[in-house]
Image (cartoon, rainbow, N blue to C red):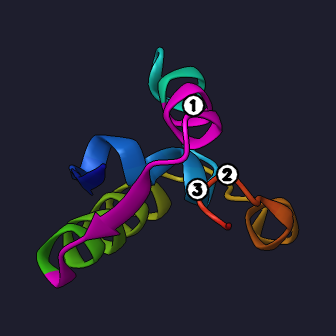
Amino acid sequence: MRILLDTSFLLPSVGIQVTGASELIQKLKEEGNDFYYSSFSLLETLWVLTSLERRGVQIDMQAVLKDTLLMP
């Protein structure tokens, strides 16, 4: 099945925890589903990161780069 991911499901890929998102993606991944996302969701994800940075939240980019949640 092809699944279009909302921004809330992309956030764990950049180190932002969203309750239940990682577990659901992992389950769907194990079932052999294909994931897609829009460029607007990527833009919104960047906005969230920027907003957190402005509030002084540290993002561990090394951990983000190692995350393979959405990788095949």
Residue 59 included in the magenta stretch of the image: no
User: Which residue carries the number 2 mark?
Assistant: 69
Q: Nearer the viewer, residue 24 or 33?
A: 33
| Identity of the residue drawn at 66% across and 67% down | 71
Pointer 3 or 2: first along the chain: 3
For discs 3 and 2, the disc positioned in front in the rendered view: 2
Pointer 2 or 1: first along the chain: 1
Circles 3 and 2 in contact, beta carbons < 8 Å: yes
User: Which residue carries the number 3 mark?
Assistant: 13
Q: Is residue 1 above or below residue 22?
A: below
Counting from the top left corner in percent of width and height, residue 65 is at 78, 73
Q: Is residue 16 above or below residue 26?
A: below
Question: Which element type, helix, strand or loop, lies under badge 3?
Answer: helix
Question: Which element type, helix, strand or loop, lies under badge 2?
Answer: loop
The stretch in magenta equals 25-39
| Identity of the residue drawn at 67% across and 58% down | 59
